[in-house]
Amino acid sequence: MLVCIILLVWLLLVWMYFLWSRRRYYKAAWQLRGPIGWPFIGMGLQMMTPETFLQYMDGLSRKFKAPFISWMGTNCILYVNDPSTVEQIFNSTHCTNKGDIYRFMSSAIGDGLFTSSSPRWHKHRRLINPAFGRQILSNFLPIFNAEAEVFLQKLDLEGVQHGKQLEIYQILKKIVLEAACQTTMGKKMNFQHDRSTAIFEAYSGLTEVCVKRMLSPWLYPEFIYRRSRLFSQQQKVVGELFGFIEQLLEPIVSVVSSHASATDQNLNDSRSKSKSIFIEQVREHVERGQLSWQDVRDEANVTIAATFETTSTALYFAILCLAMHPCYQEKLYEELVRELPSIESVSPDQLQRLEYTEMVINEAMRLFSPVPMVLRSADQDIEILRDDGEFLIPQGTQIGIDIYNMQRDERVWGPLAKTYNPEAHFGPDCPPQHAFAFVPFTKGLRMCIGYRYAQMLMKLLLARIFRSYRVSTEARLEDLLVKGNISLKLKNYPLCRVERR
């Protein structure tokens, strides 16, 4: 009996110490009140389903005054979905680190730019940044044009000659991944063949595993997760992806510079001409001792995944929105006929002049943000302003920035917020918006390193597609069911018809 009493007293003391050590979080939660959740798991039960996660968060943002505090497991979460607070977070030097639960991704695919924290992130960003400069990206246009031609041939063969309705997303992913491998790793992979299926399934499986763990607080402890079925799934897909990355990291001759023969002299000439691409730049950093080969593997894995996932997602939704809105598709076609008299290739100057093309892409990314939510961590106490005062956010608070719902919010974008209308939201006569109301690639101190790459590839592919073809679908905007994933997904992907112009 005495032993039980001592044990209970000890447990009570531990519990009281735990609560006392977290008193600053509870004070913040009292001032910025949100949903309370359950002990130890917080809002885990309500948020564990990707198919309803974004809709659930939208409902909370209308019930409680954002930004507000909630709980995920024992983590204190500041939920943000208004441009003013987003600006404060993205521009804060104390909020550049990704949220703690991104470690689930880094443990699976490596600690690359997407997941790493300072000082590692700052060092790697500085070393890799030159590979995504404007002038260097212009050198990739021949590859983009060549892959666009492959995509158009596929559309013509399957959609026009065979008369099939197409799931364009599956075809598009192969094209974008092929372009990503060539422009970052200097290697042509021929993904149009069936051998790519396992790679896509592995990338898709990995993101689903990571998201399920993020939304399941009871799987946060490593010793529990490693005994779960989810961990077994992760190990299977990680093995597939690591084999793919190792294949890409084999000695290469860059396709960016030349099609040299495999002699030592030609290899050296090729490498000297292709310092711009990611793999050649990081190879030099390894030779200088600035990066390890493990760093290179991690960055290669994350770079390839982020490049093809977000770009193919954003481009697909742009195509789908235009297919659902033929009036805007015709306006786009008028610009393309005017600016692209030749349809065989697109030059940098021509891309610059495609203003309406950029508008339709931006409107699609507004409605369907490629990355629906990002997480940051406060590495020091920060002050945030709300219209009813200034509030202290304690060090260690996890910050969830809900980009998807913010960019669809009528309180931010007006009565047409949930409709596809490029001119109303990005046209020359549209009302001015807050600078941080539209952040598909984030903004501020940790803006996506590859945003220019994605913009260039999307504009070129979209221009080549709609200059030659008309795309239609029976799907409607209001019928699409989105899934909250690391990159935005649909529960079902509509089929599209393609016809020649």
Image: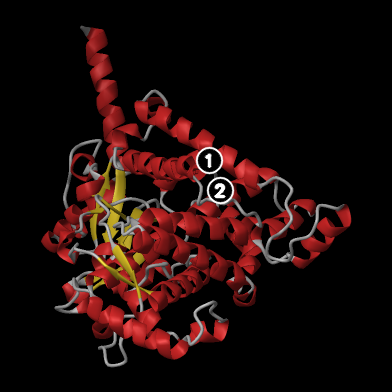
Residue 336 visible in the snapshot: yes
Indicate whether 22 appears above or below 226: below
Q: Residue at x 20, y 58 (%)?
A: 480
Query: Which sits in the foreground, 456 or 51?
Result: 456
Taking the image as shown, residue 312 lies to the left or right of residue 130, namely left
Q: Quadrant of the N terminus?
A: top left
Q: Position of residue 177 (x, y in %)?
A: 51, 55
Residue 307 visible in the snapshot: no
Q: Position of residue 105 (x, y in %)?
A: 45, 44
Disc 2 residue type (three-letter): Asn
Query: For the view shown, which residue lies furthest in the left direction?
Result: 63
Residue position marked by numbered label 2 in the rendering: 301
* Mark 1 vs mark 2, CA separation in Å: 8 Å
Task: Give the image quarter of residue 267.
Answer: bottom right
Callout 2: SS: helix
Q: Position of residue 45 (x, y in %)?
A: 20, 39
Query: Which sits in the foreground, 202 or 497?
Result: 497
Q: Are marks 1 and 2 in contact (CB under 8 Å)?
A: yes
Snapshot colouring: secondary structure
Q: Residue at x 29, y 40 (%)?
A: 74
Q: Residue at x 42, y 41 (%)?
A: 201
Residue position marked by numbered label 1 in the rendering: 241
**Mark 1 or mark 2, whichever is nearer to me:** 1
Mark 1 packing: few (<14 Cα in 10 Å), some, or many (20+)? many
Callout 1: SS: helix
Query: For the view shown, which residue lies furthest in the right direction?
Result: 265
Disc 1 residue type (three-letter): Leu
Q: Quadrant of the C terminus?
A: bottom left
